[in-house]
Image (cartoon, grey):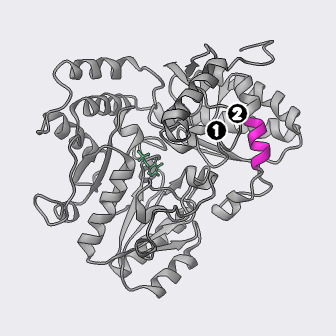
Amino acid sequence: MNEGIVTMHYDKSIKAYEKARNVIPGGVDSPVRAFKSVGGTPLFIKKGEGAYLIDVDGNRYVDYVQSWGPLIFGHANKTIEKAVIKAVKKGLSFGAPTKAETKLATLICSIFPDMDKVRFVSSGTEAVMSAIRLARGFTGKDDIIKFEGCYHGHSDSLLVQAGSGAVTFGSPSSPGVPADLTKHTLLAKYNDIKSVKKCFENSKNIACIIIEPIAGNMGFVPADPKFLEELRALCDKHGTLLIFDEVMSGFRASLKGAQGIYQTLPDLVTFGKVIGGGMPVGAFAGRAEVMDKLSPDGPVYQAGTLSGNPVAMAAGLASLEQIVDESDLYVRLEKKAKRLVEGLKEAAKEAGIPLQVGAIGSMFGFFFNEKPVKNFDDALKSDTTRFAAFHQGMLREGFYFACSQFETGFICDAMSDEIIEETIEAAQKVFKEIA
Ligand SMILES: *Cc1c(COP(=O)(O)O)cnc(C)c1O
């Protein structure tokens, strides 16, 4: 692919970026898109086709970002496209209930038997923010525990040692977030139960623990199964709710997300990304006893003008129904993810570059790191300069990876085995150049 092309042309992206910067802060509507940590200009996208992205200069890339997770079937999936067009023709929004919401909620509850009710919102950030308010309202407690390097969206009390763009830009807690708010956010270390116990020693007022059970925003770092079990036990002992933030891992790591991989069950779970099939959808779910505390049945207020939007619901339904229909989807995806990371690891080894890799379901990750990565401190010891060189090299070869060492990669069903092999071949070349 792109054989013989020494330098790709990015002229149109460069021009588009200049224009955007005049009217949009940093030229982007979400910071990690700006390519800050890898250098160069963000690519402006013209369209997507299955596994591929095509930029405004006409370059074609294999896309391992997939809109940061939502597109499990790849770009412009025909079934989702048809469902969306059908819904659009009936009107874009009503601000009144539609049957599509009940249908999607029923499907989700059937996948997660421990979840009785779901409420839809419009983003992952909103889902987590609302789940935390609900946990506080339900328990009557104010403090929350979050883990260093986990990202739960950009709401105030969660922008403390957050991952994703917040890692790359090195401001753990952002200006504009009052210290009075974040004092209720207790920080613990991922995969380190002692640090969690310490939080419980310091506060008798802990409403919830929120965790990415398969962390994807400090790079790809799965939790140890025993760690999750111990969190569950601590929550039960202290009357604290356990929230799994599965905005990324939900319907990505497996049909049931982390709950399909681990034995531990949460009290509340948050979704986003795949649940909307590419449209803006988030959701949070739990037992009726907890969810019924939400307004209008209960006192905990939560609302949204475009929540459960009919077009977004149509996309979510079309995506989830395809997922449920394809019983071996995740086996297929995981086989490709594992082949990719094993191939990358081998290629790196041949070039004398230490690389840590991992994959679960359609999620994968790799760190330019001497040692296995178990938490945020480990992740931060990765060689980000080498990552930047790898990213640039792969882009030139026609492979679009997330533009930060601290992100996760995604396999989509439109990726063939040949594409995976081509990626490994390109990586062999790039690793040799950057060794
Ligand atoms: C992406 C993400 C969020 C935020 O979702 P948005 O839709 O970007 O607001 C929250 N939690 C996790 C684990 C995520 O990966």
The residue identified by callout 2 is 40
Q: Is residue 278 above or below residue 405?
A: above
Q: Is 309 left, or right, of 253 in this rendering?
A: left
Q: CA distance from mark 2 to mark 1?
A: 6 Å
- Of callouts 2 and 1, which one flags the residue occurring earlier in the amino acid sequence? 1
Q: Is residue 264 above or below residue 427?
A: below
x, y percent for residue 308: 22, 40
Q: Is residue 169 above or below residue 74?
A: below
* Residue 377, label in figure: none
x, y percent for residue 313: 26, 34
Q: Quadrant of residue 3?
A: top right
Quarter holding the N terminus is top right
Q: Do tag 2 and tag 1 residues touch (Cβ < 8 Å)?
A: yes
The amino acid beneath tag 1 is Phe
Q: Is 393 left, or right, of 172 in this rendering?
A: right
The residue identified by callout 1 is 35
Nearer the observer, 218 or 253? 218
Please give the name of the residue rendered at 59% of the width and 72% of the height, measured from the top-left corner. 192
x, y percent for residue 389: 78, 37
